[in-house]
């Protein structure tokens, strides 16, 4: 075997390796290829062992050729090995496939009551406008529910509320609050102006359950008291709340009304959220939705809590949470809020 | 209150006729528009025609042919009504005209004869149900004129909601005055007076007031009348205002009440024994049958109108009696126009449960100075419609004269309250059209308002400011947003934590319920709760709402039952709500009111397809509880076995926070659960106020040790009655400060551990902050832990 023969044998082997190694079907086949091309009985091993039989002048060239052959073939084998390992890993992972559309483990998250959601949203809007939140007892005395709110005993306006009385204290002294307004009195007794507070809570009326009335219901009420508070501030606050809660472009309008604890008193209406004021079924084609009552705190209310009405002025406003939720989400019967039917609770 | 525009127009002639403008005006001044009726809105092109000739229809027995003259021409129509005759003036709807219901007329042929339109019955014009004949028009109607005008159908009726502070607006005159002020147009009340041709009242009747504080004024006026039906205009006006015509005398009293706001009552003088009136308080046990046929029992607080022999004949200001009412045969009457004090009428009306048009006005306050004018108006009308002749010198018993209130109004104060910049002249300009006279004073800022007696609601400066605001227009006031100095908005910690508690519970899969705070005792008892101490309502509407809940859990258990009965037995619900106990020394007379948090889980926990579904058990309840307690980072919580209300006695425990029981957790008593769907129900209820007030875990930073932990496993056999928690507590105590954590990893019963015993296996991790623990250290700690458990619980260490 002369140098040319030897080099030619390596060339043939290389061609074979380039053909066979990338075709190895699996890791075992590749190991066979590797043995044939680089193992003890491989051509390159034979050539390598015979180098010493070649004339010294040829040995470097042959040695170099052997080295190059080994390097190239080893690289080919390693490349194929990586390829095959990838294929195998892919196959193995495919066998481990899991259907992620199966229902998740554990109980699905529960839902907050729709009235709670409305209440929290409103609280957050008012907190953003600089208000605090206050609460009070649901069972109240006549003083907080009526007398301090400019409705002394036998005041005809008391008949605006059908009151549930409780068998405690003097006759008709203790009652279930008919509105959240008693909290106004408690807030004004507990702190001095400036006051900017909203008061959500449960209220009670001696009402028969129908589509829009329930003996137990929720209100939210706001109170602002400071020096120099005006009716313009009341209208501006209602407007700011309307925009913050219902969105830009929505506005409010006020029309005179009567409440014993405010004067001047007003009802406020907001742009219909459904039609943005163009008129639709939700707003009886008026473009406006009646939301609640408001007004300037009556001087007699200030007198009941020991504020000087010449020094301080203020305003209050309030509305029903169920009413708001019904209008906004199209709930057609107030009973839905009290049945606790999962099919209702889980809609929101 | 229904106010026809034509009637308002008698006092404010320049009112606009546009329904939209009127509605905006009314709403803007607080006369809230419920509806606007326009009876003639759908009628168009119907005109007055004279019937020239009527001949039989050649091809139909019941039809006739009428030749009509409509002013600018004549034509022929087919008509089926029996009442037509030549010479009559009738409403004629020619082809092209429209009638209510969207009906449009066309020329057509009926049984071979051409009909160029039709003659109209009352029903066809939307005037009522009468379809018996063609409407007959007044003889002076002009041919070709629009019948809407001839019949008053061009009118519109404002249906207004009047707030209780505005008695003046319960009258046409009052509404007209308010609207005239709004539109800044003239307002006048035409002077009317009867000719008083009849005999002097003094000789025919007497009036005596024995309760002058309750009846400060009483006008009695006699008249001779002929009772009969009212003329069409009067009947139509009452109908439009929502009242049913009865006879000319009663209709006149109602007409004047609607117009002036002053309720009137007509007595049949011949049926009034003693021919006189005595106004007095009822005696104890006295009674009277009112016009509606109901026998009324009266009290000493009720005011009566009595006859000349002091026998009751009417409940003052509310309803007359049957004995003295005007009937067809009445020929002489005594008309009452009185002023009764408002609170008295209100209380009697409320107590009798009897509210009438009269009482609604008296209890709000009528005009004490308007009695005589109203009576004169009625007498003038009776002359026209009932051949009345009013007596001269009406009796006007007036023991307590009405005074006009004088109220100071400061321009500076008006602007300070409203946020306006009105001048004094502008303020006066708003008030004077309302009949409020404004007198100048030495201070240019100050006017003295002299308030008319028909505005009893105006007593204070703020009442005048409201009037200025109302007529300036609430929506014309510049809107500003107050910035109270030194305040900041936000939720308190407790308010934030209540939200966290809600989110913790939705996180474990429970949805928030709202259950009623009003319950029946039986509702509590059926859930195994005692109803002792439940606060009762004085005047419940229904037995199911007769006391206040003492716990939230019963309501939630009922909600589980509701869902189960609707095919949803697998339920998780929670509620945050108030509960009520008997008053404590600190709360009396109010009940002891607290906020609770409660949660129930019922039925199966769905685990398929990952695992088998399983019934909820107490560990689901403790998990839900733990999520609340962990969210709040409560420092000192213990679960102490013991029977809780409504709970399975061996599967419930007290929740002890800071050493005091604040609630219960466990499985609802199976007998209770069986009443509400049958499946297991577990849950908890805690006093949320006390949870929020409890001590919380320290939030002080503790360095994290860099040294490795050593762990050991220990298993003990203990008696079943020993709570696992007490073994863990002993391990912690015995292991000392180097115990990092303890985990119970196995709990089982078997023959090997012996009957009545349980094996509890724990992993304990020890770690020192400053060094690696040696084997010797760990051995010592292990022995300490074991010794502590054995000593504290009587346990046996498993080999």
Image: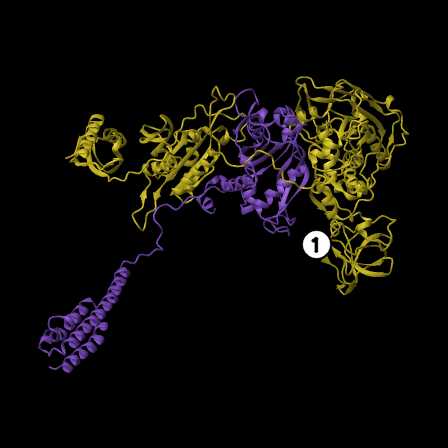
Residue at image coords 90%, 32%: B195
Q: Residues within 10 Å of mark 1 (few under 14, many from 20)?
A: few
Q: Is residue B46 left or right of residue A315?
A: right
Residue identifier under label 1:
B101
User: Could you say where residue A122 lies in the image, as x and y percent from the top left?
Assistant: 54, 41
Left-right relation of A298 to A92 = right
Chain of the residue that carries numbered disc 1 in the rendered image: B
Residue A183 location (% of width, % of height):
56, 30
Front in this rendered view, residue A313 or B148: A313
Question: In which quadrant of the rendered image does the C terminus of chain B lie?
Answer: top left
What residue is rendered at 46% in x and 42% in y?
Answer: A112
Q: Residue furthest front?
A: A57
Q: Which chain is yellow?
A: B
**Relative to B744, is B606 on the left or the right?**
right
Does the image show residue A150? no
Q: Is residue A304 above or below residue B432?
A: above
**Residue nearest the observer in this picture, B753 or A238:** A238
Q: Nearer the viewer, residue A334 or B31?
A: B31
Q: How many marks?
A: 1
Q: Where is residue A110, by image quadrant?
A: top left
Question: Could you say which is closer to the camera, residue A309 or residue B362?
Answer: A309
Residue A296 spot, x, y in % from top left: 65, 33
SS of the residue under disc 1: loop
Up/down of B647 relative to A72, above or below? above
Q: Quadrant of residue B350?
A: top right
Figure check: A283 above or below B246: below
Q: Colour of chain A?
A: purple
Coloring basis for residues: by chain
Let me know if residue A104 appears in the view.
yes
Percent of width and height locating residue B755: 18, 32
Residue at the far left: name it: A53
Q: Is residue B546 left or right of residue A311?
A: left
């Amino acid at each position: 075997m002369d140098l040319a023969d030897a080099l030619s044998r390596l060339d043939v082997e290389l061609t074979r390796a380039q053909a066979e190694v990338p075709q190895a079907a699996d890791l075992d086949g590749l190991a066979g290829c590797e043995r044939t091309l680089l193992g003890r009985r491989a051509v390159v091993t034979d050539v390598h062992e015979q180098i010493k039989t070649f004339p010294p002048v040829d040995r470097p060239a042959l040695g170099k050729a052997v080295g190059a052959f080994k390097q190239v073939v080893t690289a080919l084998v390693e490349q194929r090995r990586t390829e095959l390992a990838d294929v195998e890993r892919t196959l193995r992972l495919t066998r481990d496939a899991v259907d992620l559309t199966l229902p998740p483990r554990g109980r699905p998250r529960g839902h907050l009551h729709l009235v709670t959601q409305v209440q929290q949203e409103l609280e957050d809007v008012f907190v953003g406008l600089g208000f605090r939140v206050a609460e009070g007892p649901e069972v109240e005395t006549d003083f907080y529910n009526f007398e301090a709110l400019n409705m002394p005993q036998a005041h005809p306006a008391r008949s605006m509320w059908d009151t549930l009385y409780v068998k405690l204290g003097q006759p008709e002294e203790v009652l279930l609050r008919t509105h959240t307004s008693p909290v106004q009195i408690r807030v004004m007794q507990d702190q001095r102006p400036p006051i900017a507070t909203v008061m959500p809570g449960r209220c009670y009326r001696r009402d028969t359950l129908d589509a829009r009335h329930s003996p137990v219901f929720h209100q939210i009420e706001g109170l602002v008291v400071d020096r120099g508070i005006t009716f313009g501030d009341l209208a501006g606050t209602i407007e700011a709340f309307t925009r913050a809660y219902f969105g830009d472009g929505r506005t409010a309008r006020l029309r005179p009304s009567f409440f014993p604890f405010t004067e001047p008193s007003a009802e406020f209406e907001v742009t219909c959220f459904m039609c943005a004021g163009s008129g639709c079924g939700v707003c009886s084609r008026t473009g406006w939705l009646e939301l609640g009552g408001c007004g300037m705190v009556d001087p007699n209310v200030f007198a009941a809590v020991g504020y000087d009405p010449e020094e301080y002025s203020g305003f209050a406003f309030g509305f029903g949470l169920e009413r708001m939720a019904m209008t906004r989400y199209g709930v057609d019967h107030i009973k839905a809020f009290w049945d606790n039917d999962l099919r209702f609770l889980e809609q929101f | 209150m229904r106010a026809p525009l034509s009637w308002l127009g008698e006092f404010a002639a320049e009112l606009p006729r546009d329904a939209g403008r009127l509605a905006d005006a009314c709403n803007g001044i607080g006369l809230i528009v419920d509806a606007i009726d326009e009876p003639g809105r759908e009628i168009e092109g119907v005109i007055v025609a004279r019937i020239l000739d009527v001949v039989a229809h050649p091809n139909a027995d019941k039809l006739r042919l009428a030749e009509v003259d409509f002013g600018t021409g004549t034509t022929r129509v087919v008509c089926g009504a029996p009442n037509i005759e030549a010479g009559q003036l009738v409403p004629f709807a020619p082809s092209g005209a429209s009638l209510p219901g969207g009906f449009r007329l066309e020329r057509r042929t009926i049984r071979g004869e051409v009909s160029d339109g039709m003659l109209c019955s009352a029903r066809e014009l939307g005037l009522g149900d009468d379809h018996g004949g063609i409407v007959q028009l007044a003889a002076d109607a002009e041919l070709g004129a629009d019948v809407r005008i001839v019949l008053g159908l061009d009118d519109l009726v404002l249906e207004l909601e009047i707030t209780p502070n505005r008695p003046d607006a319960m009258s046409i005159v009052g509404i007209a005055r308010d609207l005239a002020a709004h539109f800044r147009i003239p307002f006048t009340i035409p002077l009317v007076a009867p000719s008083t041709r009849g005999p002097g009242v003094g000789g025919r009747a007497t009036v005596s007031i024995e309760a002058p504080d309750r009846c400060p004024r009483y006008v009695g006026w006699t008249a001779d009348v002929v009772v009969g039906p009212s003329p069409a205009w009067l009947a139509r006006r009452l109908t439009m205002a929502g009242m049913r015509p009865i006879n000319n005398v009663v209709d006149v009293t109602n007409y004047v009440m609607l117009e002036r706001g002053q309720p009137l009552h007509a007595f049949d003088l011949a049926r009034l024994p003693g021919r006189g009136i005595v106004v007095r308080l009822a005696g104890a046990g006295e009674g009277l049958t009112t016009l509606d046929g109901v026998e009324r029992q009266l009290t000493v607080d009720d005011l009566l109108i009595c006859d000349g022999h002091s026998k009751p004949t009417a409940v003052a200001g509310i309803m007359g009696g049957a004995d003295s009412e005007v009937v067809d045969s009445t020929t002489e009457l005594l008309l009452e126009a009185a002023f009764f004090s408002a609170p008295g009428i209100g209380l009697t009306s409320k107590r009798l449960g009897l509210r009438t048009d009269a009482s609604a006005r008296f209890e709000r306050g009528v005009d004490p100075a308007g009695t005589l004018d109203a009576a004169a108006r009625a007498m003038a009308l009776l002359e026209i419609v009932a051949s009345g002749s009013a007596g001269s010198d009406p009796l006007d018993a007036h023991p307590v004269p009405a005074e006009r209130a004088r109220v100071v109004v400061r321009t500076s104060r008006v602007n300070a309250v409203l946020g306006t910049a009105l001048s004094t002249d502008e303020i006066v300009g708003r008030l004077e059209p309302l009949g409020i006279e404004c007198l100048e004073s030495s201070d240019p800022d100050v006017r003295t308002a002299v308030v008319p007696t028909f505005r009893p609601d105006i007593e204070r400066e703020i009442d005048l400011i409201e009037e200025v605001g109302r007529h300036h227009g609430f929506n014309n006031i510049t809107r500003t947003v107050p910035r109270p100095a030194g305040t900041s908005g936000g939720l308190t910690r407790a308010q934030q934590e209540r939200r966290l508690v809600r989110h913790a519970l939705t996180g474990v899969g429970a949805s928030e319920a709202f259950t009623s705070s009003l319950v029946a005792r039986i509702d509590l008892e059926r859930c195994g709760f005692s109803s002792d101490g439940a606060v009762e309502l004085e005047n419940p509407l229904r037995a199911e709402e007769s006391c206040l809940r003492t716990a939230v859990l019963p309501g939630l258990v009922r909600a589980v039952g509701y869902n189960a009965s609707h095919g949803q037995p697998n339920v998780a619900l929670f509620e945050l709500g108030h509960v009520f106990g008997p008053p404590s020394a600190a709360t009396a007379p109010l009940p002891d009111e607290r906020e609770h948090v409660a949660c129930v889980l019922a039925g199966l926990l769905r685990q398929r397809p990952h695992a088998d579904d399983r019934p909820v058990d107490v560990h689901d309840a403790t998990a839900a509880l733990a999520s609340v307690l962990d969210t709040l980072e409560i420092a000192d919580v213990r679960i102490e076995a013991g029977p809780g209300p409504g709970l399975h006695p061996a599967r419930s425990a007290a929740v002890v926070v800071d050493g005091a029981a604040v609630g219960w957790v466990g499985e609802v008593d199976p007998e209770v659960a069986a009443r509400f769907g049958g499946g297991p129900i577990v849950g908890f209820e805690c006093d949320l106020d006390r949870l929020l007030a409890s001590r919380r875990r320290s939030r002080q930073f503790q360095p994290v040790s860099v040294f490795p932990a050593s762990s050991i496993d220990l298993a003990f056999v203990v008696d079943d009655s020993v709570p696992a928690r007490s073994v863990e507590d002993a391990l912690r105590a015995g292991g000392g400060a180097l115990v990092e954590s303890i985990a119970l990893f196995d709990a089982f019963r078997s023959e090997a551990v012996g009957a009545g015993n349980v094996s509890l296996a724990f992993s304990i991790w020890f770690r020192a902050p400053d060094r690696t623990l040696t084997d010797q250290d760990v051995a010592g700690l292990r022995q300490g832990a074991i010794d502590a458990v054995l000593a504290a619980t009587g346990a046996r260490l498993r080999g």
